[in-house]
Image: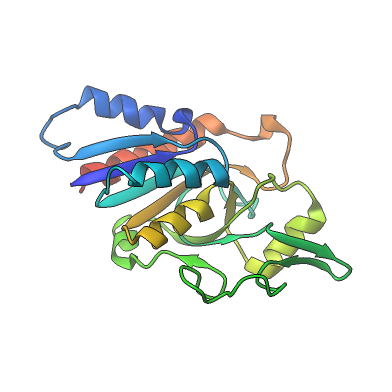
Amino acid sequence: MHCLLVAATAAEITPFTEHLAQTDKLIHIDFDVDILITGVGSVATTYALTRYLQHKRPELIIQAGVAGSFDPKVPTGTVYAVQKEIIADMGAVEKQGFANVFELGLANPNEAPFKRSWLTNPNTTLLKRSRLKKVNAITVNEISTSKKRIQYYQEAYQPALESMEGAAFHYVCLQENIPFMQLRSISNTVGVRNKKQWDMPLAIEELNKVLIRLLEAL
């Protein structure tokens, strides 16, 4: 099997890449793994992934990264498999509040690869094999800090988490018809800007434990 592992930053998957190097060509790593570091954000992710796919076509693509949780009760380091993504902050602020591009009539919510405005992973068997809780997520260009905007996201989309790359990843994989899975580990609560309350090391540690388990089980 040829698998592509995608991450916004190298730090998010460093424990996995170190493990891969140490177990190179051992029996339980008997498939090809390419690593693609895209850079942060949807634009960088879309470009880097599309450019890669011009030259290679993997049988599976996994995106791994950290995310913010909308539920402050969720423990840091909890890892999820994202089932549905939506681009949450692409639209316009009007008198009645924020309206996304679908509500504005600028895009068809059911034009492929969208389904009711969402970018849904159709690989249900793959998601089930992850043994992770499946959640919906939003992708934003600006980490959410405004209480009003956070409330809008929660009421409009009922997301479990937010990132800056997930929707771009889903979009490209759906357009290219390549099986994919997005994994996210919670590093912080959405809206908390005090970095002392974030735990990136724990989030990365737990994310990579799942990555190693999943890829060694392929």
The foreground one among 19 and 121 is 121
Total marks in image = 0
Q: Visible in this render: residue 82?
A: no
Name the residue rendered at 23%, 22% in the picture.
22
Q: Visible in this render: residue 43?
A: yes
Whole-percent x, y for residue 208 in the image: 38, 36
Q: Residue furthest left?
A: 27
Whole-percent x, y for residue 61 in the image: 33, 49
Q: Residue furthest front?
A: 54
Name the residue rendered at 76%, 46% in the picture.
145
77 left or right, relative to 68: left
State the colouring used for the structure image. Answer: rainbow
Name the residue rendered at 77%, 57% in the picture.
149
In the displayed structure, 91 sits above or below 21; it is below
In the displayed structure, 17 sits above or below 49; it is above
Q: Residue furthest right?
A: 95
Whole-percent x, y for residue 143 in the image: 68, 44
In the displayed structure, 194 sits above or below 86; it is above
The foreground one among 215 and 35 is 35
**Location of residue 48 (image quadrant):** top left
In the displayed structure, 212 sits above or below 14; it is below
17 left or right, relative to 145: left
Whole-percent x, y for residue 24 in the image: 18, 27
The foreground one among 208 and 166 is 166
